[in-house]
Amino acid sequence: MSRPTRAPGRLARYGFGTAEGDGGARAADLLGPDGLRLWQPAEQEPVDEAAAELLAALSRAADPDLALRQLHRIVEAESRSADGTAGSRATDGSAESSLLADLHNDPGLRRRLVAVLGASSALGDHLVANPEHCLTLRTAPDGLAPIAEGRLEPADGGHPVAALRTAYRLALLRIAAADLTGGRGLEQTMAALSALADATLSAAYEIAVAELADGTERPRLAVVAMGKCGGGELNYVSDVDVIFVAAEDADLSAATQVATRLISICGLVAWPVDAALRPEGSRGPLVRTLASHLAYYRRWARTWEFQALLKARPAAGDLPLAQEWIDQLAPLVWRAAERPEAVEDVRAMRRRIIDNIPPKELEREIKRGPGGLRDIEFAVQLLQLVHGRGDETLREPGTIPALRALVAGGYVGRADGEALLRGYRFLRSVEHRLQLQGLRRTHTVPAEPGALRWLAAALGFTATPGRSAVESFRAEWVTHATEVRRLHAKLLYRPLLESVARVPADGLRLTPEAARNRLEILGFADPAGALRHLQALTGGVSRTAAIQRTLLPVLLSEFADAPEPDRGLLNYRKVSDKLGSTPWYLRLLRDGGPVARRLARVLALSRYVADLLARDPEALRLLAEENELAPRPPEVLREGFLAAAARHADPVEATSAVRALRRRELVRVACADVLCRAGSLAPSPTRPDGANRPAPGLSDITQVGTALADVTDATLAAALRAAQASQPAPEGLRFAVIGMGRLGGYESNYLSDADVLFVYDPPAGVAESAASAAAHAIAEELRRLLGVPAPDPPLGVDADLRPEGRQGPLVRSLAAYATYYARWSRVWEAQALLRARFVCGDAGLGAEFEAMIDPVRYPADGLTREQVVEIRRIKARVETERLPRGADPATHTKLGRGGLADVEWAVQLVQLRHAGANPALRGTRTLDALAAAERAGLIDPADAAEMAAGWSLAAQVRNALMLVRGRAGDQLPRHGVELAGVVRLLGRDDPGEFLDEYLRTGRRSRAAAERVLDA
């Protein structure tokens, strides 16, 4: 027989020859006169219109070559069946093929059959063996497609198992055809496959029961679907997970026989039945009674077993018994997340699954691999376990319905939920196409180029200019996998989950009665008032209210840990009232790591931070990033503040911008301070090189003082720039601000004024009076700008440490300062100058000022005896006159025994006496000077340690008092909520023990300071 003329070029346009790599030669054989007789080789065109329509349909198949080969085989089989001769050729009867006629007359059949043949070699093989089954895809007389909902059509007689297998294949064929031709979406396809599994299990159950020995009573046996089948999201080829439940002990023997036979039948008909999720797994009995199940789950079940029960659903057998089993276990499922290890158990299980994937398959695994289906399922199931205890709308067995419920309830953001849904649909579609091809269980994207081309085509990807269909598929796969991986980490490792899991289930239901009871249990002083706040926050059906209902059970527990829970809730409501309508606020609290618990802690413990956040609620974004809770370097602060001031021509507006930045920086430092002893909530910022570094906090008071002083320095620098821009001054006038007191010593607290001196240097040829007037105007303008009423915390500029105090001029020239200190200064002024340092303005002038005062504050010959006596006399007078009336000297942090003043006077006396001869003592920081004195042998090491401990503890308590009260105060109370707040802020537990420690530390510090002062 001569080979027909080929038309590879023309047939290639139909997509033939791509998979074969023969340019369409094989297709020409199958379609030509010796094949299906649909193609005229000489004319290079279809034989008629019907042939053209069939060729067009074949060209749209996922694999046109596969579809053509399968169709050719089916027609051959049909011909052999008709002729009754197994060896006859299709060419003898293809012209009269009834199937080809049906394909011409029924466009729906043509579309459905070709789609199946091009996508599934396994279903094609089935149709080759059973050509008559093609007709199950015919269009109904009413014009509708065949029903594809998973129902089993009664098969002709014969062996029940064989009939069931045939019925199963026909139902599967209809589902696949509907899926491949757009007649069913993914969710409908999964539901149909799950329904088909139920029907198959039920049919197998009845066959197994019918095979019981005569006289055996029908057992009460329930088949509970688990896994994907239980969730109504079964794929084409998968083990069907089940658990068998018998009603009573008397049913066990027969029930076990039925269950065993059911497993065997389903393996022959459709897929393996896996009962390994039962108690004790494969080591446990195949069938247990309801009572035995309950006993096991109450005592022995692990977290993953309760996680598996999320998808339990009655499937076959005694359905009421199955539902009773589910209902009895439900309370245990919804308490599982309260186990201390539950959340971590789920996370660890996910990690183990990834670890068990062969490395060569890891990147191609769409089910178990990173960014795969398991990532979505585990995230959803963990959220269900934690939040479903109080929200019954989340108790959905299916992944998609559960995810939708999580979004609707505010537990997952809308954008995140949509991204997960898109990823899930994409990955499940890929899984379906991979499994449908050979009807075998697989979740791995092929690496072979031809298989990848088929998969891309089966998923509907087409080539575009500059990009092949495979490249388009890969790009979308990578996009979805990356997003799923990101969201999996975000949701599964959300810190809020552990906090919610620790809240009892009753505490998650914020009904008025339940909420009131919980508020009383948590220690709220005014439960009725707190309940009104909760109702205001959670009332209604808005998404905002839904998210608040998710957050508040956790926040209430955090508020309850504070001495004043009511104040924490009130502050939270104030912030929420201001920000509740903004799109990012509640999303940040829900998704932003530890933000919600951090916010609760700072609002409950610190009125100072609460007041700042009330003025600038957007500053709470700082709580989301670890590095945002570290102080900014001084040069960064100065540049930022100066740039903000430079953007405004008006000095008041410029200073307002600077003060707003200062407020934000105060929030940053104060929040870090409040959180530094909060365990897992403590910030842990990293250096640019990735190394961890400690955040400023109460545990390191020197960092807090430095950070606050740096903020004040930057504020003064920017305000000075604005003042100079608004006040005319002689060209060349130099002006500088010198820091004094706590600002100069880098020991500022949250409510410190800026103690300063103003110095200027007139330019040559300018009258002293004109230069003085200009400098005075600049200083006054700087003080005015920083004192303008505003919602930002005030920064007082105090120049009372200047020569002659308030009676002296506000500003002096460098020469005038030199004259005054040379002729009239007293020892206490030299002592004040120990903390003097340049802050802002003309750096050269600042350096000259420091050089000018060095001989004054560091006298070369030290102090005379009379000067030492004078310092001791002044200190005693200060203690007597400045200690507030009624103050307790034992617990006054500044002027009390062993407090700040005691240590500072002692250290400064040592500096005045010895810094002239020992340059190591020349520093403005108290603890640095104390350490230098110890190293120089000027202070006994034991005394230095006692003084350092006393000064540090007093400074910590003073800052903590300001944070707790929101106002200045130096007196540590001996009882009450303020003492409890300070103790909590400092990471201690017992106020009485802490007070004893403070008194003991103060006594020792006082004794050491007195020894130094008397030396």
Image (spheres, rainbow, N blue to C red):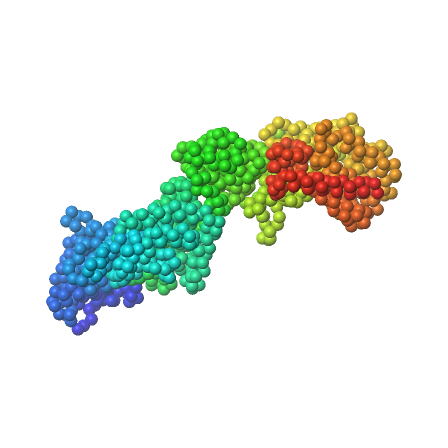
Furthest-front residue in view? 250
- Tell me how many marks there are: 0
Q: What residue is drawn where x is 60% and y is 31%?
A: 792
Report whether 685 appears left or right of 196: right
Residue 515 image position (x, y, % from top left): 45, 35
Front position in the image: 56 or 715 = 715
For residue 570, above or below residue 987: above
Tell me the quadrant of the picture where the N terminus can be found.
Answer: bottom left
Tell me the quadrant of the picture where the C terminus can be found.
Answer: top right
Furthest-bottom residue in view? 1
Q: What residue is drawn where x is 16% and y is 62%?
A: 158
Q: Is residue 627 visible?
A: no
For residue 644, what is the image quadrant?
top right
Q: Is residue 505 visible?
A: yes
Q: What residue is drawn where x is 24% and y is 50%?
A: 149
Residue 498 image position (x, y, % from top left): 48, 46
For residue 1011, what is the image quadrant?
top right
For residue 760, above or below residue 255: above
Q: What residue is drawn where x is 28% and y is 54%?
A: 221
Front position in the image: 951 or 715 = 951
